[in-house]
Amino acid sequence: MSPIPPTIALRPLAPPHLRIAVRGFSVLSRPPPAYPHHVPLTTPERILLGAGSAIVSLINPRRADMIATCGETTATPYFIYRLRDAMLSDPVGRRILKDRPRITSKSLNLEKMRAMRDGTVGREYVRWLDREGVSPDTRTQVRYIDDPECAYVMQRYRECHDFYHALTGLPVVREGEVALKAFEFCNTLIPMTGLSMFAAVTLKKDEKKRIWDTYFPWAIRNGLQSKEVINIYWEEELETDVVALRERLGIEMPPDMRQTRAAARKAKKKTEKTAPPA
Amino acid sequence: MPPNHLLRLTALRRLNSTSLRLSQRSYATTPFPEQDIYDVVIVGGGPAGLSLASALRSSSVTNKLKVALIEGQDLGPQKPYKPKPGTFSNRVSSLTPGSVRFLENIGAWKHIQEERVQDYHGMKVWDGVSNAKIIFSSDLLPTAPTIAYMCENLNLVSSLLSRLDELGSTEILDKARVEGIEYGQDDGELDLTSWPVVTVSSGRKLAARLLVGADGANSPVRTFAGIETRGWDYGRHGVVATLRIEDVEQRKQAYQRFLPTGPVALLPLPGDFATMVWSTTPQYAAKLKSLSPTDFAAMANAAFRLSHVDLKYILENMTSGLAEEVSWRESATPRDPALTPTHIVDVQAGSVASFPLKMRHADSYISERIALIGDAAHSVHPLAGQGLNQGIGDVQSLVRTLEHAVQHGQDVGSLLSLEPYYSEQYLKNHMLMGVVDKLHMLYGTTSPPVVAVRSLGLSAVNALDGLKSFIMGRAAGR
């Protein structure tokens, strides 16, 4: 029997980042990173990291790095691929995947956006950034997703999160984040956003009531019925009218959370004044 | 040729019973000419019909039978198969070693142009959604180093015609369309009332002791016999094309990828050629046929490399720039290097064609003085490359049956003689068609639980070398 000739060697090998998805490995033979910051994980590592980061995120939601890790480790299998396929099925989504734009304070011209007309996406986004006191640079790099294209999809989702805040008007307080995560789960199906809905148990009693009565129903209804928000090319929509964009996507505005919270605080102070503490 | 004594025996036997009633009987005006009475009339000059004729004439038992073959197309240009050099016909079939052994036994294989036949030794089949794979290699079965042979249909037909020429004594009526089939008449001397009589376009009538329908899926012989077929259309078209590839392997492999819309297969031909069969929806088939050669070659590569989501988007939404889009997506889609076939460079002009896919099985392969072989009896999905091999299996079985009948002095056209052919072939064919149909159904969905289960099953079978060599042995026709 003649030896099998090296037919595979004759064919040009796929570059490393395209081969990683099909090979299993052990901790002793970790493959090289497929993109900057990439850390390939084995399945037990992923499970442990996912569970641990989920617990820490629940205890301390200010740990953005833990929330990011939880999102990345629970996104495979299936969920991040589904989101990537949703982008591939849409013409704008495909352009985003081809161009791979990044949202940072350097890539967005904030001064120019401040000068835009009121009611445009750009102006409302900067207004929201100023109101909440955040900047676009606070997003961690994706590390634990093996496929480079899916890693970009996760990064894009993370960087667009602030735009979703501006789109829905929800503030950065815990209540607002939980409501927005519920909306994102129904729209993008990323598991971490679904897990974040459990953070509702850590809310105060009246916040919990508002979430349960108003914001969760709003989030579920709108998340399911609106178009995929991952397919919005934000860099091109900066001069669009926000109301027109919401209509195009099929999103209705929830009640203004900051106003509702302020009114509730005022009412509470009033009742405390009239009924002196015992 | 001297009249066959067996021929007259059956017809004349009735003379005793009719002679008493001579005065009451009405005769046919002219007696049926003896030179137009045949033992076997084969309708259809495709591979099945020609194989049957060659086999009957090569067998020492049946070569005394008077055989005629009727074919509607002109067989003259097909006899010396002289294709343009550097081109391959897009109608290519995969012949199992069992089929090739049969063709060698009947003396037809020596006439084939071997340099246009490609044997392959490996087969890689994988799931286009989950990338679960099964790899058949001829190393698993040292007794059968070749999995199958890719042979152009025209090459095969030409070799069979050459063999028939060599053997002689077969009446081949080409350019003769079947105008009608009816039962004969009793002319007082010969009672042909149970004999089918075929009228051809030239006006000539042939009476057949046994009429064999090898006339394809819409068989007029089957219609005449009143045999129904059962089955369904797949709602899919098979797009075929002859392609030029980049890297030529020393040990040629066949590749098949199951996409949700249907499987796409790349089968090797001699040199740097390959043939592709892509079963897909009629809309995608029409789109593929309308593409420029560059875009078509890009889509042929895409079929084996891109995700089904990508293919769906490109085929439904893009009309130009497909090659660039495919090139971009190839750089971003992970793939298993062991499974990816070599890059497809070009498509042969005029070789892109499509045909509808269906499954049909005739209720019976036989009737009084009628037998059906090949596509007239059954149509199968091409995903397993078994259609032509099933037809050759039919021919082998029918020849054995007729040999037995002749050796035992039976009337070759009677149901009693033909029954063994039907019982030997029917269940075998039915099971194969059933398995192929269920494979098509199983791989036609993207539903995650089904994908998970079928991928697990495929990977499990891939790990069992014993099972794989068993499957290969059965498929090779041992």
Image (tube, grey):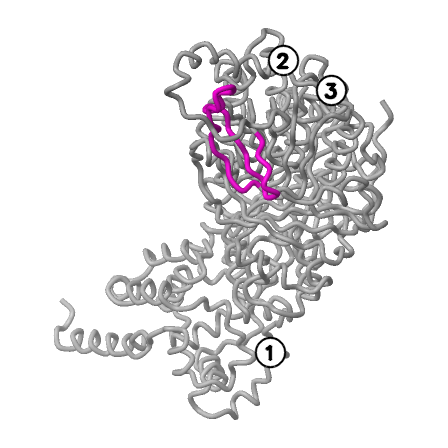
Q: Position of residue B112 (x, y in %)?
A: 80, 33
Q: Secondary structure at mark 1?
A: loop
What residue is pinned by disc 3? B58
> What subunit carries mark 1?
A
In the image, farthest residue toward the front: B23
Q: Look at the image and tell me in which quarter the C terminus of chain B lies.
A: top right
Neighbour tally class for label 3: few under 14, some 14-19, many 20 plus, Cα within 10 Å? some
Q: Amino acid at mark 1?
A: Ser
| Residue B37 appears anywhere in the view | yes
Q: Is residue B194 magenta?
A: yes
Which is more toward the observer, B284 or B450? B284
Is tag 2's residue or tag 3's residue first in the polypeptide sequence? 2
Which is more toward the observer, A134 or B219? B219
Q: Position of residue B122 (x, y in %)?
A: 73, 33
Q: Quadrant of residue B269?
A: top right
| Range covered by the magenta-colored residues | B178-206
Real-space CA distance between mark 2 and mark 1, rounded to the nearest whole angstrom: 101 Å
What residue is pinned by disc 1? A105
Which is more toward the observer, A276 or B37? B37
Q: Secondary structure at mark 2?
A: helix
> What subunit carries mark 3?
B
Q: At 55% across and 22% down in the image, what residue appears?
A: B209
Q: Amino acid at mark 2?
A: His
> What subunit carries mark 2?
B
What residue is pinned by disc 2? B5
On the same chain, marks 2 and 1? The answer is no
Q: Secondary structure at mark 3?
A: helix
Q: Amino acid at mark 3?
A: Ser
Which is more toward the observer, B327 or B475? B475
Say which of marks 1 and 3 sits in front. Answer: 3
| Residue B331 appears anywhere in the view | no
